[in-house]
């Protein structure tokens, strides 16, 4: 909305800055941050009044962990609503609303947020610890993947633009002209994988949002470069028309994440719940798809990969051998049961997430 003020640059000095994605990215981050800080206390109060507190499932095999987390019982969840709202307002204020990629990414985030909200509501309000059925969520994520593919297919700069997979470190695409159905499956794996990986990581105060911030920062850089013809050519990146606006979106995610972290750091006053985690993970996957950097997400989201991988390995090991590899999965709970303090686990995982983000950015010069 404010983007269009640049039309008055001939009449008013300084209005030309609204044309620049770098300026609007910083403004979007600051707007989302300030909105989060201003609205956070009220949001927490409303969630507490509605008695949307975090339930704890006590199991005998994790009694020690239940004791460690007993103080969290009753902490309001569904705080992801704050993230969704502040990002949406910031994007509407600072992005070019004629940009088709912006609407795709924003719509994907809100759609997954709605699925997460339904899951949280089932757990909290209806006291169903399992939430909505798992295949419902997978089906919704699969439908989103189909929509994303079709949307990009019909709005791309040239036919077949999104039938190509790019590999980090390589200058040319590894797979060209993949069949449409294979790309839909690939997109579904990216969206489902990132969405559920962030959801699994959201088990300690500040852990998931802190790691999401570093990934969003990484993709803000990727999006800006992919939308700049000169830089994209120099770095052998696929040029994506309008991708620079997604850098503004990513900046809004960063600002909103920092604002949410203010209330979510240990001891947390609010949890994001599936409302936030499914939306955050999924939207990062959609952004990666838009700029052809899906596989770089494995590097940038290294912590999310470790968390999801630990669950897969734990389940596979137990079913095949009857033994567990970790004291508990996801991985952050393993370290808790090994004696690490919650804040120690969180900060060390943040550090690993920053290292992973730098590794992903390093691929830009290794092409």
Image (cartoon, grey):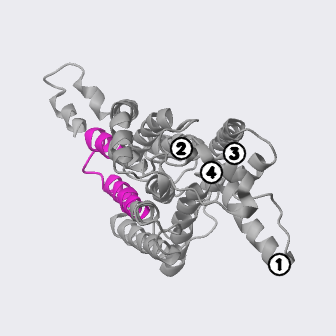
- Label 2's element? helix
Which span is picked out in magenta? 87-116
Tag on residue 366? 3
Q: Is residue 318 within the magenta segment?
A: no
Nearest to the eye among marks 3 and 2: give it. Answer: 2
Q: Nearer the viewer, residue 257 or 50?
A: 50
- Label 3's element? loop
Q: Are marks 3 and 1 in contact (CB under 8 Å)?
A: no
Q: Give the distance between the C-alpha atoms of the residues marked 1 and 4, in whole angstroms.
A: 28 Å
Q: Which residue is mark 2?
A: 209
Q: Which residue is mark 4?
A: 301
- Give the x, y percent position of residue 130: 53, 69
Tag on residue 273? none
- The mark nearer the N terminus, 2 or 4, is 2
Residue 164 in view (yes/no): no
Q: Give the distance between the C-alpha atoms of the residues marked 3 and 1, in whole angstroms.
A: 40 Å
- Label 1's element? helix
Nearest to the eye among marks 1 and 4: give it. Answer: 1
Q: Residue at x 34, y 52 (%)?
A: 102
- Give the x, y percent position of residue 212: 55, 45
Q: Give the distance between the C-alpha atoms of the residues marked 2 and 4, in whole angstroms.
A: 12 Å
Q: Is residue 100 shown above or below 87? A: below
């Amino acid at each position: 909305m404010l983007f269009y003020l640049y039309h008055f640059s001939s009449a008013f000095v300084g209005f030309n800055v609204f044309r620049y994605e770098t300026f609007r990215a910083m403004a979007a981050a600051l707007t989302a941050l300030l909105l989060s800080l201003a609205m956070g206390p009220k949001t927490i109060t409303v969630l507490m009044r509605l008695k949307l507190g975090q339930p704890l499932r006590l199991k005998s095999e994790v009694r020690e962990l239940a004791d460690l987390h007993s103080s969290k019982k009753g902490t309001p969840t569904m705080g992801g609503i704050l993230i969704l709202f502040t990002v949406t307002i910031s994007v509407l204020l600072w992005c070019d609303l004629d940009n088709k990629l912006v609407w795709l990414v924003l719509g994907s985030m809100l759609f997954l947020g709605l699925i997460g909200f339904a899951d949280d509501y089932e757990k909290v309000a209806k006291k169903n610890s399992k939430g909505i059925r798992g295949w419902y969520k997978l089906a919704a994520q699969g439908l989103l993947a189909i929509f994303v593919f079709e949307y990009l297919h019909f709005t791309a700069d040239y036919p077949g633009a999104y039938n190509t997979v790019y590999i980090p470190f390589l200058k040319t695409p590894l797979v060209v002209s993949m069949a449409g159905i294979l790309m839909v499956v690939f997109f579904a794996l990216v969206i489902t994988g990132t969405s559920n990986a962030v959801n699994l990581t959201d088990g300690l105060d500040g852990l998931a949002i802190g790691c999401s911030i570093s990934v969003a920062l990484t993709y803000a850089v990727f999006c800006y470069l992919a939308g700049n013809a000169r830089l994209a050519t120099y770095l052998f990146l696929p040029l994506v028309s309008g991708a620079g606006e997604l850098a503004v979106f990513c900046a809004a995610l960063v600002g909103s994440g920092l604002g949410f972290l203010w209330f979510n750091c240990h001891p947390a006053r609010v949890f994001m719940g599936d409302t936030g985690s499914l939306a955050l993970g999924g939207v990062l996957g959609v952004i990666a798809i838009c700029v052809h950097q899906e596989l770089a997400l494995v590097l940038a989201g290294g912590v999310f990969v470790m968390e999801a991988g630990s669950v897969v390995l734990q389940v596979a090991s137990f079913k095949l051998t009857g033994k567990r590899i970790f004291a508990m999965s996801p991985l952050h709970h393993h370290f808790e049961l090994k004696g690490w303090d919650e804040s120690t686990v969180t900060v060390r995982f943040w550090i690993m997430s920053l290292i992973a983000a730098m590794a992903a950015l390093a691929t830009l010069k290794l092409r």
